Image (cartoon, grey):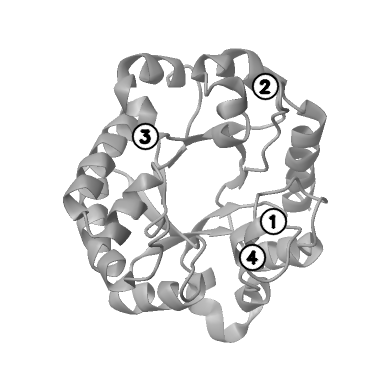
Amino acid sequence: MNRILCSTGAIITRRNNRDYKLLHSIVPQLHCDALEFMMYESWHECIEPLQAVLCDFDVPVFHMTKQIGEYISQGDIAAATTLFRADCQLAAAIHAKLLVLHLWSGRASDQHIERNIAAYPVLRDVAEEHGLLLTVENVLCNTQDPLTHMRTLAEQYPDIRFTFDTKMAAFHSQMDALYKPENAWLAERIAHFHVNDYAGGHMDWTNFSAKALGRGHVDFARFFAFVRDIGYTGDFTCEGTAVNEDGSIRYDEMNNSLDWIRKEVSR
């Protein structure tokens, strides 16, 4: 059964001081079934109180600290693995099941993609030690494109699973690629979807933030028709930031996106 998740990264940001304790007042007002937790590197300094809060919620999906991929891209595999293992420990403690990883990230991004691809099995093994399913997300590239790297990963590691983000795909003009028969290898490996809109052009770095559904140009009618056709039964996460400058939440905007996804997947 498909569940509709809200990313904590959409509701806990710098604008409300990344105060994770706000989840207790925010989450009850959201039309979601559960949460995808977005981990920040700074929160590694307060793991115990953070874990205590998260245990009050259903958190089936854990988004790994983005700096993990950045460290790998920079060539510091030891630092990446240490951070990854700490994330896995927290994810297991809050009973998450699926991990979302930016395998490449930061300014170095995919400039040395061989490092990132070589690091994957090391991280996968750590995730499996903790009973967690590792998925690699089609995140932004500044040298090539996500689909190219995902194809290489699938060829080298046939059992790999992916998280597919509609905004990331639209940024690289790769939404249409998802629907092509020759890319069935991708669809059959998708274990999770991030459903976000995108309002920019091809690799428009000035406009790459995730938007609420309907605030961009992603063809969601086609996307959801495809999802239904392939019989996808996993979860969907909405990530479009809904925090105002003063830290308050745009509940109507977020709930509109969550309700939109629920309506489409229940057809």
Residue type beneath disc 2: Gly
In front here: 100 or 261?
100
Q: Earlier in the sequence, mark 4 or mark 3?
A: 3
In whole angstroms, how far apart are the C-alphas of marks 3 and 1? 24 Å
What's under tag 4, amino acid-wise?
Answer: Phe
* Cβ atoms at labels 4 and 2 below 8 Å apart: no
- C-alpha distance separating marks 1 and 4: 9 Å
Residue 118 screen position, x and y as percent: 23, 68
Q: Residues within 10 Å of mark 3 (few under 14, many from 20)?
A: few
Q: Give the CA distance from mark 4 to mark 2.
A: 27 Å
Distance between the Cα atoms at labels 4 and 3?
A: 25 Å
Label 3 SS: helix
Q: Which mark is residue 171?
A: 4
Image coordinates for residue 157, horizontal then vertical, percent? 30, 71
Q: Which mark is residue 247?
A: 2
Disc with the residue nearer the chain's start (4 vs 2): 4
- Looking at the rendered structure, the secondary structure element under dot 1 is helix
Q: Is residue 111 above or below residue 168?
A: below
Q: Which mark is residue 41?
A: 3
Can you give x and y, in whole percent of width and height, for residue 193 in the image?
A: 57, 54
Q: Residue at x 66, y 32 (%)?
A: 32
CB atoms at circles 1 and 2 under 8 Å apart?
no
* Element at label 4: helix
Label at residue 207: 1
SS type, badge 2 = loop
Contact flag, marks 3 and 1 (Cβ < 8 Å): no
- Residue sitting at 35 percent across and 34 percent down? 91
